[in-house]
Structures are given as structure tokens and as C-alpha cells.
Amino acid sequence: DQQVKQNSPSLSVQEGRISILNCDYTNSMFDYFLWYKKYPAEGPTFLISISSIKDKNEDGRFTVFLNKSAKHLSLHIVPSQPGDSAVYFCAASGMNYGGSQGNLIFGKGTKLSVKP
Amino acid sequence: GAGVSQSPRYKVAKRGQDVALRCDPISGHVSLFWYQQALGQGPEFLTYFQNEAQLDKSGLPSDRFFAERPEGSVSTLKIQRTQQEDSAVYLCASSLWYLAGEDTQYFGPGTRLTVL
């Protein structure tokens, strides 16, 4: 049973427009969420994170929104650029989660294509 | 500074062979994680070290998998008697704090293992 779900395997957006990537989770013990970007043949690169005590975190063109009641988070990229084309992974962890101290639970990823 | 490095980047093994995968974490990082990423999936947790102590190995799929970090820095993941289902990308990540609940994990490029 997947605890972190990214229901859209792919997303295509025009350059300059907004990209919205979604992620849902089922375990209410998660209290820290991260987004990673992955290019082919490279490891995941950290993008942005959010703690459960916040509902928004912004870093340049990237903003993550957290809706705890809905167990939903989203990553907004504005404006989207062709270099943003990659696979984006949502990940969750929590100190009180039954797993290890902070091991991440990942979604399956969403492949973003930004067209010029 | 230098990021997480892994070697080899690619490894082809015949079924039944033993393999050893190396991870050099970011200098000074206390926590080290190993993940396995199958094709089309997100990374899945294998094991976690805090310095030289292996605090969680709940994700190791069988007793053929063994990991160590004897001096609290470099780590090796060993797979004995490899099987075709072991084919995957093996990712190593490190983070600064031992209470890793809200700490960012930085990933290496991964080792792609193919078992023939």
C-alpha cells in the first residue's frame, strides 16, 4: 500500500506558464515533506521542503503548499523553464513515523516536460 | 564542496556473483541512508546508519544484503549471490544531523546494477 502517491505520471507545460505537481499521503505521522528533482542518470537533487507546522514555503520560482487536513501537497513552479524538465519526486518522513529516524518515503514521481 | 559520491556508477554481474557498492558521504554528515530504486518507481529505503552504528536495516530485502560503515564515513553495500530481481539503481544519501526528522538528505548519483 503506497503511503505517498503521485497520481500523475507525466505533465506537459508551456514555457513561461505555471507547473503544478501534486502529491497525496496517507500516514498522518508524516511531518516533513520534500521535493526532489531527478535528471536521467543522476541522483535526486533536493529542491524544497516544508514542515507540517507550515502551510507554505517559497524559494525563488518554487513554492510548496501543504494541506494537512487533506493530506495533500503541491509544488508550483512559476514561470516554468525548459531546464525544469525532469522527474519530480515527492517524499515524506517523520520522527514519530514507525520507520527509521527520518528515512524518506517516496512517491513514484511525475515527469515534467516544459516545451519552449 | 564535494557532494555524495558513489562507485562504481554501473555494475554488471552474472547471477550468483557477489557485488560491493561504495558510498562516500558529504564530509561531516552523521546520517547515511541506502535506497533501492527499481525502474519506474521511487527510491525505497534499505538501511540507515548514524555514524558507524546501523540503526535500521528493516528495508533490506533479504539476508543476502549487507551494509557497513565501519569508521562512520564511507559505507559499503554488499549483495551476495545476486539475483535478477536485484537489478536496480542503488542510491546513497547523507544528512548532517542524527535526529534526521527534519533534515535534508543529499543523494549521490547512484550505482546501476544489472544482473544477467
Image: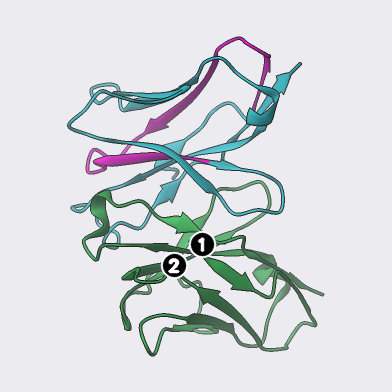
The picture's colour for chain B is green
Q: Which chain is cyan?
A: A
> Which of disc 2 and disc 1 is earlier in sequence?
1
Q: In the image shown, does B30 or B27 lie closer to the viewer?
A: B27
Q: Position of residue B97 (x, y in %)?
A: 26, 62
From the viewer's perspective, is residue A31 above or below residue B65?
above
Q: Position of residue A17 (x, y in %)?
A: 60, 9
> Do the residues at pointers 1 and 2 share their chain?
yes
From the viewer's perspective, is residue B28 above or below residue A68?
below
Residue placed under numbered mark 1 in the picture:
B3
Q: What's the residue type where badge 2 is placed?
A: Ile
Q: Residue at x 31, y 71 (%)?
A: B30
| In magenta stretch: residue A26 | yes
Mark 1, residues whose alpha carbon is within 10 Å: few (<14), some, or many (≥20)? some
Q: In the image shown, does B74 or B48 lie closer to the viewer?
A: B74
Q: On the rendered structure, is B46 left or right of B8? A: left
Mark 2 residue element: loop
Q: Residue at x 54, y 28 (%)?
A: A7
Q: What's the residue type where badge 1 is placed?
A: Gly
Instruction: Please identify the dominant SS of the magenta region.
Output: strand
Quarter containing the C terminus of chain A = top right
Q: Residue at x 46, y 70 (%)?
A: B25
Quarter containing the N terminus of chain A = top left
